[in-house]
Image (cartoon, coloured by chain):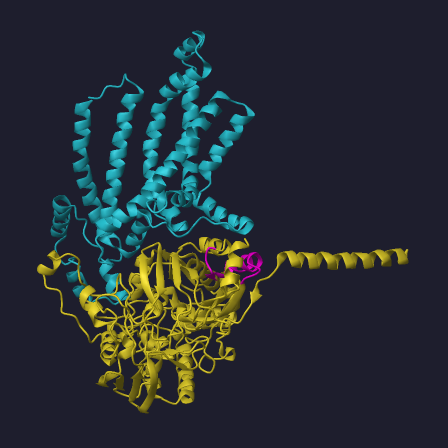
Chain colours: A cyan, B yellow
């Protein structure tokens, strides 16, 4: 187990390096460079060459990449926004908690809804309740979250003269107000993910409940809920944990839309405006952070398997 | 039988009237007020104002920006201001002005005007030296030293030189600025320059302190001036907050203590915030009008024209790079396109009818805009005939470019459908914002849906688009006769004569048929029935917050009554 963990941990660094190289190159391939936008549209500098030189973009690309990686490794410095001149590390530190809070709350609601509903649906297979819950799941997967968000905003304002607070309230300033602000977008984000988790939970539970050891457990006279939670659900969890791991990527991408609709100054919005404006260091920095988060979360998910099923051995 | 029918018929009519009245009562309608109505009678000091903006400004620099207009109107001042309906001049930092001859403008500054009490200016007095510096900076004449190679890159942060200011063409005729004393500014132009006063009164001609530029290099995160409000908080993508400047030179202003502008990108979310009474005012899009009128029945609703206009452009022509490509080099083809666009239907399909049909490049300015009687007119038969005469009886293939905003795309689709009727098969190219502007500013496209932004003077809608190639930046058109006419209109100091001449310029532009001037957007907004604001037609001036005041008890009651 320890060897497995060390090997996986060490693999993080070359993975991030490859991702950084890919993002560095791809962002510069997007048609319409930052120099053109700044010089032509915004009137920065006296000509494109001056802008290119001032931003350090006149250097060979391998030199730019080397300088960039060197600063990150030696000083943890992600550079400066080409537009605002602000240190990217500061902006990320400012915005990461917003996206993290939104993502974690969405994950919480996902598991809170998806797993219990999947269990209930499996235990009440082919009942009216089962059909209702499965229809809900199909609806949750089909209906775009942003559409639901707009409907919710519009109709709650019209019918109840209510809208979630639009001015961002940091958690450190007021945890309750922050929670009230985030609960709506987090819940809306969780619907589609919970639907996916619910379907997987139901499928796995149905499979596991038919196993011999479950029949044996029941025959031994164990309490029904002990059979369901301690024996059936635990064995059904491994694919569910895998799905949760995969959904983390969707979670990170999904915050962009909700942050725009609910006016949350998170990383998603920052990334979107950086892409529009070709703010290369910001695009690179945020992608590195997202990559690191996803790699770490996937490592945690993989390690969870050993906890859920002691038969799993890591090599 | 007839009596029976008559009796019930009368009851039916009576019931119908009752139902209609009740229906109308439940629907309710917001109260319409004149956008320009403003009074200070009973004005109260104090209170807090909540507003919303659709985007974070890229920068807070008035000489750079095209998006931060409302922001620096609160923190900075100009010498003068163009009046709400753009028919006069209001004094701001200047306590008086006069034009001593055709080339000379003399401004006497108010005494004791101070910059905000923030470092590095620390509340020092604003003088004529600041005015000189600011106008020269705007003209691109105050050039900071170029960053040194190597050393500059290693230094923390980076300083980009802002030399090619977006509105530097305002000052192309600036000859000199003299400051004989602390409070007198004498501006001389090279030739008589009719737009000068308007340019000096624009939202971009703000007076800024040199020390801020020297310390920060720019106004990216700070917005320090002599204005009525101090920018106390600016969180990108979230909000910005202003607090009353206690040292403002107008002692009875501003009225409101704090203003908070929340950045709400989504227009539905903005409407929801207004209906939930989280914000005190809103500007809406056409499709939101019925909902707002119905659901905010006790609000004040305003509607007026704007100076923003939608344009269908044909290829730009830079003769220094070669001739205009076929088939666009044939004026009959261009005229065929103009006559193929049904502007009334265009407005109905894209703006639900809430827009003002334009004739030429200058919208909404009585006496200068061309009258509707001079519309080129929608005439499909004429279009087809022109195309056939030009050698394209079956039309031809082309492209229409737009950026990926819903309104832009809708316009491009409607234009595509209208051109199809005369055989022009236009492929739609919907581009991401950065890609669109790259093609637009390398003048590399066939047709494009574009926005001509609001202008403080007709010159601003002519020179950057149709003027000489060296100075035109938004579009290119190689017509030396037109160039000369555009330069000549600037020299005509008599407003009536100038207006007539500008109309002739517009006629020539229409005759050349390089663009279809579609419509101007309608400005539609609402505010709580307690918020008094002095509104300005020029979209970059909007409302100067120093004049806004709130009936405090009414605001409290309105926000409670949900």
User: In the orientation shown, which residue stands out farthest toward the bottom?
Assistant: B101
Residue B219's quadrant in the figure? bottom left
Residue B463's quadrant in the figure? bottom left
Assign the C terminus of chain A to one quadrant of the image. Answer: top left
Assign the N terminus of chain A to one quadrant of the image. Answer: top left
- Magenta extent: B278-299
* Residue sitting at x 49%, y 76%: B375
Q: Classify residue B84 as left or right of residue B160.
A: right
Whether residue B333 is visible to the viewer of this picture, yes or no, is: no
Q: Does residue A130 show up magenta in the picture?
A: no
User: In the orientation shown, which residue stands out farthest toward the top?
Assistant: A220
Q: Position of residue A212 (x, y in %)?
A: 40, 11
Q: Does residue B287 show up magenta in the picture?
A: yes
Q: Position of residue B286 (x, y in %)?
A: 50, 61
Vertical side of B537 occupied by A145: above or below: above
* Residue sitting at x 60%, y 61%: B29
Q: How many marks?
A: 0
Residue B486's quadrant in the figure? bottom left
In the image shown, does B512 or A28 lie closer to the viewer?
A28
Whether residue B64 is visible to the viewer of this picture, yes or no, is: yes
* Residue sitting at x 38%, y 16%: A231
In the image shown, does B92 or B372 lie closer to the viewer?
B92
Q: Position of residue B134 (x, y in %)?
A: 25, 75
Q: Position of residue B74 (x, y in %)?
A: 35, 68
Vertical side of A208 occupied by B504: above or below: below
Q: Classify residue B226 as left or right of residue B50.
A: left
In the image shown, does B38 or A44 lie closer to the viewer?
B38
Vertical side of B313 occupied by A100: above or below: above
């Amino acid at each position: 187990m320890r060897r497995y963990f060390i090997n996986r941990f060490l693999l993080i660094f070359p993975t991030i390096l490859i991702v950084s190289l890919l993002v560095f190159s791809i962002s510069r391939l997007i048609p319409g460079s930052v120099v053109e936008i700044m010089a032509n549209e915004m009137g920065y500098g006296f000509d494109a060459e001056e802008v290119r030189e001032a931003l350090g973009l006149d250097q060979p690309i391998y030199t730019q990449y080397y300088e960039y990686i060197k600063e990150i490794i030696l000083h943890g410095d992600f550079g400066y926004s080409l537009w605002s001149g602000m240190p990217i590390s500061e902006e990320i530190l400012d915005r990461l908690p917003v996206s993290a809070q939104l993502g974690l709350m969405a994950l919480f609601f996902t598991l809170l809804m998806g797993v219990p509903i999947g269990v209930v649906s499996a235990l009440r297979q082919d009942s009216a309740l089962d059909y209702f819950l499965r229809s809900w799941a199909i609806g949750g997967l089909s209906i775009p979250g942003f559409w639901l968000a707009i409907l919710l905003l519009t109709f709650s304002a019209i019918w109840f003269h209510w809208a979630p607070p639009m001015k961002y309230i940091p958690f450190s300033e007021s945890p309750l107000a922050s929670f009230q602000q985030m609960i709506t977008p987090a819940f809306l984000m969780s619907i589609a993910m919970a639907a996916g988790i619910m379907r997987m939970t139901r499928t796995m539970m149905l499979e596991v409940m038919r196993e011999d050891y479950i029949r044996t457990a029941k025959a031994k006279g164990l309490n029904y809920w002990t059979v369901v939670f301690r024996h059936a659900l635990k064995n059904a969890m491994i694919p569910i944990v895998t799905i949760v791991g995969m959904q983390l990527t969707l979670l990170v991408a999904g915050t962009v839309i909700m942050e725009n609709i609910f006016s949350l100054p998170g990383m998603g919005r920052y990334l979107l405006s950086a892409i529009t404006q070709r703010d290369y260091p910001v695009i690179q920095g945020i992608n590195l952070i997202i990559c690191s988060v996803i790699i770490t979360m996937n490592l945690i998910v993989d390690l969870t398997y050993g906890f859920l099923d002691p038969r799993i051995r890591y090599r | 039988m007839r009596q029976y029918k008559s009796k019930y018929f009368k009851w039916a009519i009576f019931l119908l009237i009752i139902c209609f009245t009740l229906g109308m009562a439940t629907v309710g309608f917001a109260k319409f007020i004149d956008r320009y109505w403003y009074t200070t009678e009973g004005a109260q000091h104090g209170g807090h104002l909540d507003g919303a903006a659709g985007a974070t400004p890229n920068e807070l620099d008035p000489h750079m920006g095209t998006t931060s207009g409302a922001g620096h109107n609160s923190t900075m001042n100009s010498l003068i201001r163009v009046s709400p309906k753009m028919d006069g001049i209001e004094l701001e930092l200047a306590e008086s002005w006069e034009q001593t001859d055709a080339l000379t403008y003399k401004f006497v500054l108010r005494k004791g005007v101070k910059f905000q009490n923030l470092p590095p200016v620390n509340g020092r007095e604003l003088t004529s030296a600041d005015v000189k510096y600011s106008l020269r900076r705007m003209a691109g004449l105050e050039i900071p030293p170029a960053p040194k190679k190597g050393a500059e890159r290693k230094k923390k942060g980076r300083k980009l030189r802002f030399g090619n200011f977006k509105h530097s063409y305002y000052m192309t005729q600036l000859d000199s600025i003299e400051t004989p004393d602390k409070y007198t500014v004498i501006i001389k132009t090279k030739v008589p320059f009719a737009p000068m006063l308007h340019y000096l009164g624009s939202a971009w001609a703000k007076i800024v302190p040199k020390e801020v530029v020297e310390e920060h290099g720019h106004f990216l995160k700070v917005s320090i001036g002599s204005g009525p409000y101090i920018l106390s908080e600016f969180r990108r993508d979230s909000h910005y907050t202003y607090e009353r400047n206690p040292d403002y030179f107008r002692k009875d202003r501003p009225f409101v203590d704090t203003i908070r502008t929340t950045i709400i990108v989504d227009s539905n979310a903005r409407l929801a915030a207004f209906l939930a009474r989280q914000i005190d005012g809103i500007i809406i899009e056409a499709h939101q009008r019925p909902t707002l009128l119905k659901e905010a029945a006790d609000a004040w609703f305003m509607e007026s024209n704007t100076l923003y206009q939608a344009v269908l452009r044909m290829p730009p022509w830079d003769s220094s790079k070669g001739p205009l490509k076929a088939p666009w080099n044939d004026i009959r083809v261009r005229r065929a396109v103009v006559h193929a666009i049904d502007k009334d239907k265009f407005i109905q399909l894209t703006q639900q009818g809430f827009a003002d049909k334009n004739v030429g490049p200058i919208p909404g300015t009585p006496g200068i805009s061309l009258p509707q009687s001079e519309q080129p007119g929608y005439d499909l038969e004429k279009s087809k005939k022109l195309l056939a005469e030009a050698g394209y009886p079956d039309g031809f293939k082309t492209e229409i470019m737009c950026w990926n905003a819903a309104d832009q795309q809708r316009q491009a689709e409607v234009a595509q459908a209208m051109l199809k009727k005369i055989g022009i098969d236009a492929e739609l190219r919907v581009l991401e914002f950065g890609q669109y502007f790259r093609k637009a500013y390398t003048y590399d496209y066939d047709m494009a849906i574009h926005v001509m932004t609001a202008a403080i003077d007709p010159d601003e809608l002519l020179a950057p688009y149709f003027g000489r190639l060296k100075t035109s930046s938004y579009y290119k058109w190689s017509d030396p006769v037109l160039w000369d006419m555009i330069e000549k209109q600037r020299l005509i100091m008599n407003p009536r004569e100038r207006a007539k001449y500008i109309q002739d310029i517009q006629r020539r532009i229409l005759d050349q048929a390089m663009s279809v001037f579609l419509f101007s957007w309608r400005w539609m907004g609402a505010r709580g029935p307690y918020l008094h604001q002095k509104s300005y037609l020029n979209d970059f001036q909007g409302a100067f917050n120093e004049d806004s005041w709130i009936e405090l008890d009414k605001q409290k009651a309105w926000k409670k009554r949900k």
